[in-house]
Amino acid sequence: MNKTNTSQNTFIIFFGYLGRCFLRAIESIGDAAVLSATSLAHLFHRPWQGKHIVLQLYALGVGSFVIIAITGAFTGMVLALQGYYTLAKFGSESLLGSGVALSIIRELGPVLGAFMMVGRAGSSITAEIGIMRVTEQLDALQMMAVNPKARVILPRIIAMIIALPLLVSMFDMIGLGAGYIVGVELLGVNGGAFVGEMIAKVTPMDLYAGWVKALGFGILIGIICTYMGYRATPTTEGVAKATTQAVVAGSVGVLVLDYILTSFFL
Amino acid sequence: MIHTEQLSRHFDDVIALNNTDIHIKAQQTTVIMGGSGSGKTTLLRLLAGLECPTSGHIWYGDDDLNGMSQKRLYQLRARMGMLFQYSALLNSLNVYDNVAFPLVEHTKLDNSVIHTMVTMKLEQVGLRGFENLMPSQLSGGMAKRVAFARALAMDPEVVFFDEPTSGLDPISAGVIASLIGNITKHTKMTSIVVTHDVHAGLEIADHVILLWQGKVIAEGTSDVIRNCDDARVQQFIEGRPDGPIPFSRSETSYIEDLLHKPGTVRIS
Amino acid sequence: MQSYRKTEITVGVFVFLGIMAMAWMAIKLGQVGGLGSSGYHVSATFEDAGGLRAGADVMLAGVSIGRVASVQLKGQEEALLQLEIQQGVKLTTDAIAAVRTKGIIGERYVRISQGADDETIEDHGEIEETESAINIEDLVSKYIFSSSE
């Protein structure tokens, strides 16, 4: 009797916990959607936030260029090395160019680029907005009749949406260049075959797939990171937690969205 | 000029304000005092429209803050200033740009005019010449004075002060308090100060409101408050540890708990 | 303000570089929007397209002269290919199109051998002589058959 009671209790606790987590997740998603939608609506209202979008593009986009370039270069290099190793077993090294190009353009460029942006720019967005919340800077903006959604959230989301596709394209270019150097100069694959295969196998659809992904990830990261910062518990600990959560949620979100978008573009 | 009507604010089951009615007269310094958790900061945030009340109304003349459109609220705020407890200077801007911020946002004044106005405000708080420092380079007292200058930038009609003297050394606190007193007198603005600094509060107040557990327990000029018979008021202004306001917030007595909980303490 | 001007210029350079990267990929790799696809179309009917896909190479004497634009079923038993051939490459009316394989696991492609005719195929013309894909399984089974006989 006693035993069944405890196991029943365990079930109730388990399902209660599960239900609570689920409801809280739904609630946060709804809250984030409303927050970003009301913020983005200010794009069409005066005052125009162009200057602040440019400043954020500088902080998030230009500031991330180096890390994106390094990631892109090493991704291209390792892909060429690994691809060569595998393809050489079948004597089809000539396919190396298309292998590297398709992997980078369709998949690795957008996904790794997005990861780097979550880690570098996304976390700083969350921490910055969270600290503005803790130090009452958001309230101070309110009191100076400046809407923090329009001034703080909107420029960051927009800058993220603009910057990510541009950065991903640069990632792709640098990755392809680095792949070419390793494949052709170091491993001795025929240069003409490398470039020829690359051009022959990459279709416009592959490029669209990469760009649509980059755009989607930009929107996702922008929304998640601004939301986490804006709704952070106003304590130092709360900001730290929000930053971690933003990076985790951003990265997982990118992977889930990647699967969904990939299934559309096959 | 500003008055509240049956104003309540609950946080889940904690009652911060309970049907409070207060009146704030124009061109005076009103000081709202009370211990920690007495609801005074909540009251200030409600008056400034930073939070929404659970029930009740806040009247600015004939305008109700409750249910006001955002546009109207922002119009009203253009005539308000606020000095936050931790200054809340914008990190990314230097002292000059912080003070100039409201002017740049809301006026179409020429840069040279703004420069003159900012210099005047900084002179008022005694910080002319510190324009190029960043907020992180300022001491607490200086940051507060910069925030003060910013709050005054638009020549507001109403200025809110949230714990203006807390966390400052006695001299800085005195400087801030006298600034509030002097500037209120000279510029004919309405100051609403929330503080638990009894000395400074009574010094600068034209009108004092004492809150306890979300209720007004005493109201009047500084002298009225000093001579108030209410034991709670006396305990508060004298800062005595024992009195009707309990030091411990626990509902039950710890010793009773120990005696009645089985297995905790055995008295042989 | 001076520093904002600088920021603005840097952001301008950044956006320009990003768009250049996009444009390069679009034009060079994807051949988007007709920039890379100036050519004429010819069709060819095969008994067996052997898994050929749109985008595959079309080669003449080992040189790529175009790509397969589409692969469709014609009637209920044949494959109809649309080939996009570079402008300037003239195919004779008796040219032969064959589906072939590069390397042993390599991609399928269309190999074209010129004929001897003087006339050339116009835009939207047809290559009439085709050779279907060589099916390795068929070859192997044929070999086994013949050796067992």
Image (spheres, coloured by chain):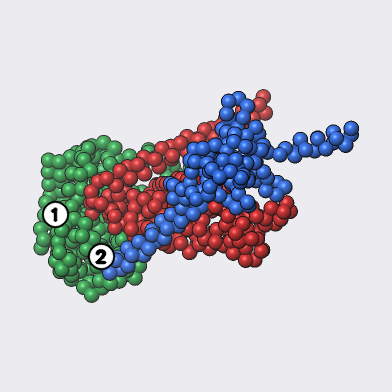
Given residues B150 and C54, the one toward you in this image is C54
Given residues A139 and A223, the one toward you in this image is A223
Colour in which chain A is shown?
red
Residue farthest front in this picture: C118
Q: Residue at x 75, y 39 (%)?
A: C136
Q: Residue at x 44, y 47 (%)?
A: C34
Task: Identify the amino acid type marked 1.
Answer: Glu
| Horizontal side of residue A35 vs C129, given as left or right | left
Residue B72 seen by the camera: yes
Give x and y (percent) for residue B57: 21, 38
Q: Are marks 2 and 1 in contact (CB under 8 Å)?
A: no
For disc 2, the chain is: B
Q: Residue at x 35, y 67 (%)?
A: B136
Whether residue A226 is situated above or below residue A183 in the rendered picture: above
Q: Residue at x 33, y 45 (%)?
A: A40
Residue under label 2, please give it.
B97
Residue under label 1, please give it.
B157
Q: Quick one: SS at disc 1?
A: loop
- Residue C117 picture quarter: top right
Give x and y (percent) for residue A74: 58, 61
Instruction: State which tag comes first along the sequence, 2 or 1.
Output: 2
- From the rendered image, report the letter of the chain displayed in blue: C
Residue farthest right in this picture: C149
Give the mark count: 2
Colour in which chain B is shown?
green
Q: How busy is the neighbourhood of tag 1: few (under 14 within 10 Å), some, or many (20 plus)? A: many
Give x and y (percent) for residue B133: 30, 71
